[in-house]
């Protein structure tokens, strides 16, 4: 009987958790839709991009709810910086989309590594580092080389100590 009470007490929390997760997925999809991707592309190509990115964002949200908050903050801060730099609106929209899906390659990282508490072992960190290249491979299907490059190089550093390509300087 005590098990019935525990199970009954958990039902509302499971439902609430599901509702919150679904809201996060919708928010990520909205970021992508609102971005108004490249106006120079044919409508069918732009439509393809939006649909693909929505699916990527949704898949990422479903596997790693932590990423939702992170990606949303990165998108917001990236847009703020881009605006302060005086970048054109089209470039700001591109940056927002890239920020919203920049960690999509984590879909290829095993859950036990993503969810591991504490510090990762060096071999585990190497696997996590692959997410930038894997994500760019996924985003490449949008046929947008700028977006693909932004996702691939989001962990590069000016000093060349970033990954996946170790770019240095203003490359």
Image: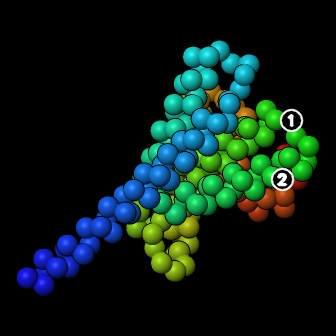
Determine the residue positioned at 47% across, 52% down.
23
Q: Is residue 114 left or right of residue 136?
A: left
Residue 73 figure quarter: bottom right
Q: Is residue 45 left or right of residue 26?
A: right
Residue, disc 1: 88
Mark 2, other Cα within 10 Å: few <14 / some 14–19 / many ≥20? few
Q: Is residue 14 left or right of residue 24?
A: left
Q: Quadrant of the N terminus?
A: bottom left
State the CA–CA distance, disc 1 to disc 2.
Answer: 12 Å
- Circles 1 and 2: CB distance less than 8 Å? no
Percent x, y for residue 10? 26, 72
Inspect this view and state whether residue 138 appears: no
Determine the residue positioned at 63% across, 55% down.
72
The disc, 1 or 2, on the residue closer to the chain's N-terminal end is 2
Residue, disc 2: 81
Percent x, y for residue 63? 42, 56
Residue 29 figure quarter: top right
Mark 1, other Cα within 10 Å: few <14 / some 14–19 / many ≥20? few
């Amino acid at each position: 009987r005590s098990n019935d009470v525990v199970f009954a007490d958990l039902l509302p929390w499971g439902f609430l958790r599901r509702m919150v997760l679904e809201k996060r997925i919708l928010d990520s999809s909205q970021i992508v839709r609102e971005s108004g991707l490249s106006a120079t592309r044919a409508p069918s190509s732009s439509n393809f991009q939006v649909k693909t990115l929505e699916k990527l964002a949704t898949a990422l949200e479903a596997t790693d709810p932590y990423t939702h908050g992170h990606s949303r903050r990165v998108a917001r801060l990236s847009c703020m910086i881009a605006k302060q730099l005086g970048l054109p609106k089209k470039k700001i929209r591109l940056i927002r989309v890239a920020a919203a899906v920049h960690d999509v390659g984590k879909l290829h990282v095993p859950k036990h590594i993503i969810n591991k508490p504490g510090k990762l072992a060096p071999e585990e960190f190497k696997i996590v580092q692959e997410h930038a290249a894997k994500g760019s491979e996924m985003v490449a299907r949008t046929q947008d080389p700028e977006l693909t490059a932004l996702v691939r190089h989001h962990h590069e550093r000016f000093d060349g100590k970033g990954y996946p390509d170790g770019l240095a300087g203003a490359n």
